[in-house]
Amino acid sequence: IDTIEAADYPAEIHVVTTKDGYILKLHRIPDPALLKDTDYSEEQPLNEPGGCQGVVLLMHGLFSTAADFVVTGPESGLAFVLADAGFDVWMGNARGTRFSRKNLNHTPKEAAFWDFSWHEIGIGDLSAIIDYMLRQTNQQSLFYVGHNQGITALLVLLSEKPRYNRKISIAAGMAPVAYLGSGNNEIVKNLAKFNDQLWVQFGSVFFLTPTENVLQFLGNIICSGEAPTQTVCSDLLAEMFGYSSDQAKLLLPGMLDNALSGISTKQLVHYGQLIQSRKLQQFDYKNFLTNMQRYKQVKAPEYNLSKVTVPFLLFSGSREFFTSSADFQKLVKNLPNVESQSELPGWGHMDFIYNAQVYLKVYSRIIEVMQNFTT
């Protein structure tokens, strides 16, 4: 909110509670045209000259928060450029992140709080957020832009609760994560190798939420532009977080502050299982009885992407951390309604937030398609 207001944009915080008790914060840059009339008793007209171009939900990736969409400022932050184009912009924060770390029934100190994967983020968080947004704006559908895990969760929702296909006009996926296992990244391979051991050892406990002191030490001392260790730090983060641009190196302190948000072990293990199986499937509890109780079958079922009817725009990079070109093309092939797909040479998944060319190569295309959409 401070970043938005410092840029002289209107800002709002909304709170949504999921059916299983998670309290989620939404950050909003409302369309100024809608602010002139706060009466939502009638549906607001879209696509009129000077009017609201539509309602958009932005959903962050793994380890991140809504801050990703404003961190680069009003000139290039996705939330800002969408607001400038006339959209009513909402940014979600998944359960477990620093903006959504409350539950009606559990505290973050309890293992039960962290018993979730991106499956629950999809069917629980996204469904609650979308329904709330549509009620608040009195719209029938919205636009969706997801980064990384933001697309994984959306695919879960649309395949498990197909009625939500009607509530999304167009979805844009930046560095989407779905099918895994075809790449050569050694870190990813090791994750798959030790994945089962990680689950047995830690189970449903929270995986990472660095303290402010740690972030300050990393961002302002170890990884600052003046530090002799900055090159080592940037190279390590380039491998871990998948960026390639010089701009990203300059923004390292901000990247650390925004990118290292809390996740559950189960989120990471679930991705590890996708690497092992090379399938987009539900969580495998590696226990006959548990799988039978949850799924009525021994093996974890695959998500049925044939039920996903939303039109997709997909953007990936050749230096993705988790995925490979083959993984990306498998997703393109298995989604029924891909309107366009692009692979950007030399891009990693954080380039879709930090690259100096991101507006020209990605955001402008998303905005153009959304503005041309007719309800």
Image (cartoon, rainbow, N blue to C red):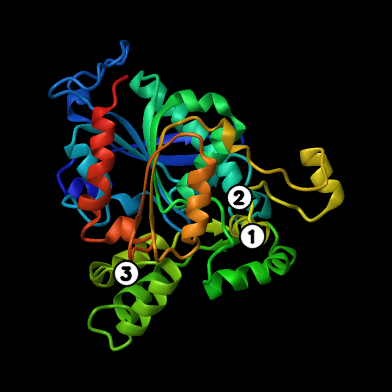
Relative to 301, 352 lies left or right: left
Q: Answer with left or right where residue 8 lies relative to residue 347.
A: left
Q: Viewer-nearest of labels 3 and 1?
A: 3
Q: CA distance from mark 2 to mark 1?
A: 9 Å
Circle 2 sits in a helix, a strand or a loop, which is it? loop
Which amino acid type is marked by label 1? Val
User: Picture coordinates of residue 237 (x, y %)?
Assistant: 40, 73
Relative to 321, residue 304 above or below: above
User: Which residue is disc 1 drawn over?
Assistant: 269
Mark 1 neighbour density, 10 Å: few (under 14) some (14–19) many (20 or more): many
Q: Are marks 3 and 2 in contact (CB under 8 Å)?
A: no
| Separation of residues labelled 3 and 2 (CA atoms) | 28 Å
Left/right placement of residue 197 relative to residue 138 reads right
In the depicted view, which residue is nearer to us: 15 or 146?
A: 146
Circle 3: is it few (<14), some (14-19), or many (20+) Cα within 10 Å?
many
Q: Residue drawn 76% across and 53% down?
A: 285
Label 2 belongs to which residue?
117
Q: Name the residue that disc number 3 marks.
A: 244
- Residue visible at 31% across and 80% down in the picture: 221
Q: Dot 1: what SS?
A: helix
Where's the C terminus, which quadrant? top left
